[in-house]
Image (spheres, helix red, strand yellow):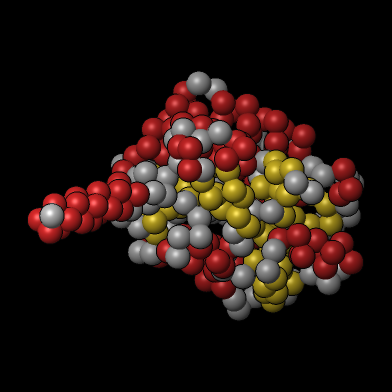
Amino acid sequence: MKARRLGAVAAAATLALTLAACGSGSGGGGGAGGDGGLKVGIKFDQPGLGLKKGTEYSGMDVDVAKYVAKELGTSEDKITWVQAPSAQRENLISTGQVDFIVATYSITDARKEKVSFAGPYFVAGQDLLVRADDSSITGPDSLNGKKLCSVKGSTSAQKVKDKFAQTVQLQEFGTYSECLPALATGGVDALTTDDAILAGFAAQPENKGKFKLVGKPFSVENYGIGLKKGDTALCQKITDAIKKMQSDGSLDKAISANLGPANYKPGPGNPPTPAACS
């Protein structure tokens, strides 16, 4: 009897360990998605790219995220959208608060030390948004003495510090939407970030006639999908999804639907060839 009881206990322990092992990979290392759902980081305040209104989410990056999720086996209703401000993106990924981020996330060497990227899926360029009646700013060479607004933790803000620190005054806010009232009232002279983001703001009905895009990009921004560093399995699945979205015309449709109202046309380098995962 004792032998049988010990055998039963051992069998139960073996079964428990087996079940634990089977469940240990949920949501991690390339296993994200499927019936378990996905936590996806996006911007909540970027019209045309990532915007939350009530319970609705819209924008080019939202469309990209939905497409990728579908290719990973997750339906739209199984996506949990997580706000991903520029300065918090690496932390959201490293702490597992998101499975991946699609949020105008420029691929840089510094960021690649902390997270991995799939892509790029889109190429933008840093530009300037000014008041519609302002003819004094015609490009980066006319910024001397001007007040610029950008977002803390963004590549756009860093580029201003690197290139124009001696000639401009930079104000850094938490989100780009916070810069707009300051620009409208003259508190700052220009909002600077990627042209696609600026086009999204300019295209909003409430901003009609208020602002204009200068149209002189002075950087190349490769948008990638950020994920946990070293997760090559998930990276490859997302890369395959990006390639499919490019080839079947879905990405072009997303760009046209979300940025077309601002007469925005993708610049040189589009569509980009995604890099190999490493």
| Lateral position of residue 208 relative to residue 212, left or right | right
Relative image position of residue 117 (x, y in whole percent): 40, 50
Name the quadrant containing residue 265. Answer: top right
Write down the quadrant of residue 136 in the picture.
bottom right
**Which residue in the rendered view is the most extreme toward the top?**
248
Identify the residue at image location x=86%, y=49%.
207
Number of marks in the rendered image: 0
Q: Is residue 205 visible?
A: yes
- Left or right, 73 with respect to 252, comes to left
Most distant residue in the front direction = 1
Looking at the image, residue 143 sits to the left or right of residue 54; the answer is left
Q: Quadrant of residue 94?
A: bottom left
**Relative height, residue 95 to residue 213 (above, below):** below
- Name the residue nearer the viewer: 2 or 49: 2
Picture residue at 52% right of the left edge, 71% below the top:
162
Q: Which sits in the foreground, 104 or 213?
A: 104
Q: Residue at coordinates 76% horizontally, 65% vertically from top-left? A: 179
Please indicate whether residue 239 sits to the left or right of residue 197 in the image: left
Residue 220 showing in the rendered view? no
* Quarter of the figure with the N terminus: bottom left
Counting from the top left corner in percent of width and height, residue 129 is at 74, 55
The picture places residue 28, in percent across and down from the top left corner, at: 37, 51
The percent position of residue 61, horizontal first and vertical second, equals 60, 43
Give me the residue at 60% from left, 78% from top. 166
